[in-house]
Image (cartoon, helix red, strand yellow):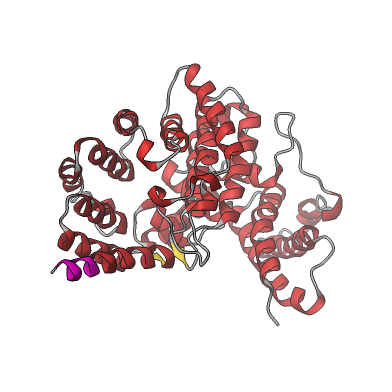
Amino acid sequence: MTLDVRAEHLLRDLAPQVLGIMCRRFGDFAASEDAVQEALIAASIAWPRDGVPDSPRAWLIQVAQRRMTDHVRSEIARRNREGALAAETDFVVEPSTQEVPEVGGLDHGDSLLLLFMCCHPALTPASAIALTLRAVGGLTTAEIANAFLVPEATMAQRISRAKQTIRTSGVAFEMPGERERAERLGSVLHVLYLIFNEGYASSIGPDLQRSDLANEAIRLTRAVHGLLPKDNEVAGLLALMLLTDARRPARTGADGELIPLAQQNRTLWDRQLIAEGIALVSAALSRGSVGPYQLQAAIAAVHDEAARHEDTDWPQILALYSLLMRMSDNPMVALSHAIATAMVEGPRAGLDLVATLDKDDRLASHYRLDAVRAHLHEMDGNHEAAIAHYLAAAGRTANIPERDYLSAQASRLAGRNEREA
């Protein structure tokens, strides 16, 4: 017997919560992660046979806790410190009665605690973000590598080194105080941004979107906003997520196929999310100190406010991307800036900007470089070049709906060429 889909989603949702509890209690990330993985394996065996328990979270905590207790005992025995056993294990409590402490007066859950804990001061920002995506977001190493535009093997080494760095740093793996939380906030927001992006546009697999990841990113960002309601970039990030997620119902067709922004039925967009997002970003921008997330939210708002694709205020979007380019070295921002340039100044201007990105190693093998180039060549009327780049992009993406869409665009143009021949 195997787990049903509901139980699989439940395990994925509960894993970061259980890991957060284990880390807080035992202070050892690597050992806690191993214990949680063993608990998940045990659940995948026991639950199909015995049924999902009434309190699945408590069940996982109890199993992981036993594994951790066994680990502690083994370590104590190895170091010949049997006398310390009681001190090491006395704090273990029944999972059903152990509640999450409040942070800043608000109960944010173990996922939020783990989020700040993983952005450890001994780690570089890139390593902290990668580790957190694995622990909190539940992303695979391949998905994290795609987000960072690096090979999977490189990312696996980075995550392994991050765990070792925490273990040897001597700095406690625990929820930071108010000052330390502020210092880690930038990394925390970037993690949430990447988790949402993977949920909204999955880099791997049969589905275009992973609503579980997108919803979790929004939930956690709301919690951070509740903790820091006056922080403009926190508000900007939440607004960006809401304004983008509002389009989710229109992004796929009946068979899960990709529907591009220009062809979406905008009556399906969630107007309540759009209104909330616009209010958030408007308030943040009015307070000054503009940052990248606020600018991206403002761009999303311009798209969402257009009743039709033809009504989009592309000059305003181009101006916002020009500001964002000054703040960010992200090649994906540069690609979007090239598209906005093409919409305002024509496709040749956009293609000239795309050409400047050919030497950026982060984009060397990424499908979006070819996909954007294909779109701009099609706008320019060069269908042969567009077909070639659509096919190249299709061959490079690991997401099946995106691959199907790009292949279909190539076939559509090839058919048009045949009819016009």
Q: Is residue 141 left or right of residue 355?
A: right
Q: Position of residue 108 (x, y in %)?
A: 70, 39
Where does the N terminus fall, quadrant-wise? bottom right
Question: Residue 197 magenta-drawn?
Answer: no
**Residue lying at 20% horizontally and 36% vertically, measured from the top left:** 345
Q: Quadrant of residue 313?
A: top left
Determine if residue 177 is in view.
Answer: no
Q: Nearer the viewer, residue 281 or 340?
A: 340
Helix, strand or loop: magenta stretch:
helix
Q: Is residue 404 left or right of residue 334?
A: right
Q: Position of residue 376 (x, y in %)?
A: 22, 50
**Residue lying at 53% horizontally and 43% vertically, measured from the top left:** 192
Q: Nearer the viewer, residue 412 or 362?
A: 412
**Residue lying at 66% horizontally and 57% vertically, measured from the top left:** 13
Decide: is 109 above or below 102: below
Decide: is 137 above or below 119: below
Q: Position of residue 276 (x, y in %)?
A: 59, 32
Question: Residue 419 magenta-drawn?
Answer: yes
Most extreme residue toward the top is 287
Q: Position of residue 32 (x, y in %)?
A: 65, 57
Where does the C terminus fall, quadrant-wise? bottom left
Decide: is 2 above or below 278: below
Q: Which residues are magenta?
A: 414-420
Q: Nearer the viewer, residue 296 or 92?
A: 296
Determine if residue 372 is in view.
Answer: yes
Decide: is 407 above or below 50: above
Most extreme residue toward the left is 421
**Residue lying at 30% horizontally and 68% vertically, measured from the top left:** 395
Total numbered labels: 0
Q: Nearer the viewer, residue 270 or 93?
A: 270
Q: Is residue 201 left or right of residue 94?
A: left
